[in-house]
Image (tube, rainbow, N blue to C red):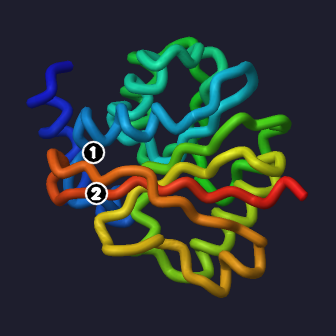
Amino acid sequence: MSHREDLGLFLGQALRRPQSVSALVPSSERLARAMAAQVPAGKGPVVELGPGTGKITRALIAAGIAAADLHLFEINAPFVELLHLRHPDATIHHRGAQQMTQVGLSDVRAVVSGLPLLSFPRGLQDEILTAAFELLPPGAPFIQFTYGPSNPVPQPLMTRLGLVAQRRCRIWGNLPPARVYTLTRSIS
């Protein structure tokens, strides 16, 4: 499937099933590479939330992460089918991101989120972040992008989970421009 066909599938799903496609447009390759660059070197599972057509997935693999280490959580059935075709060695979970603790993962190296957290209700944001930090050991990153001017996770949730946010980079070549953040829980 070409970039144009990916875009057609993405836009078609956004129109037919807007509840399962929350982004306005797919992430750019530049944003995907910037997010993949934040995954620490090493071994162990890497969770991707909301992979859609797999642009960030491809960047993760290109950055040296074994497809067999990837666990992709996607709720949109046509995207799940496409991901199975493109990444047969990855583990694809047809379920919501908030259910990531229910599949037997441990020692997760990083969670890479392609989800537009700002568009989610606070309760769902809370469920997703709580689940992620149940899987992530202290110091391991939750990697998130935002189109907004600041960290997309509400401060009360940051405080409750004991998280620290670091701004990593701004991607001007994305439409709209995006910023990458890493959220971590203190090691001490």
Above or below — where is 45 with respect to 162?
above
Q: Residue furthest left?
A: 4
Q: Amino acid at mark 2?
A: Ala
Identify the mark at residue 40; answer none if there is no mark: none
Task: Say if mark 2 contacts mark 1, CB within 8 Å.
Answer: yes
**N-terminal label among 2 and 1:** 1
Quarter in which the C terminus is drawn: bottom right
Could you tell me which quadrant the N terminus lies in? top left
178 vs 126, nearest the viewer: 178
User: Residue 16's quadrant in the figure?
Assistant: bottom left
Label 1 residue SS:
loop
- Residue linked to disc 2: 178
Amino acid type of the residue that numbered disc 1 sits on in the rendered structure: Ser
Q: Position of residue 60 (x, y in %)?
A: 47, 26
Disc number placed over residue 27 in the picture, else none? 1
Near mark 2 (Cα within 10 A), the count class, few <14, some 14-19 or many ≥20, is many
Count residues near mark 1 (Cα–Cα under 10 Å), then give few for <14, some for 14-19, many for 20+. Answer: many
User: Measuring 30% from the left and 42% from the top, which residue is drawn there?
Assistant: 31
- Which residue: 15% across, 39% down? 7
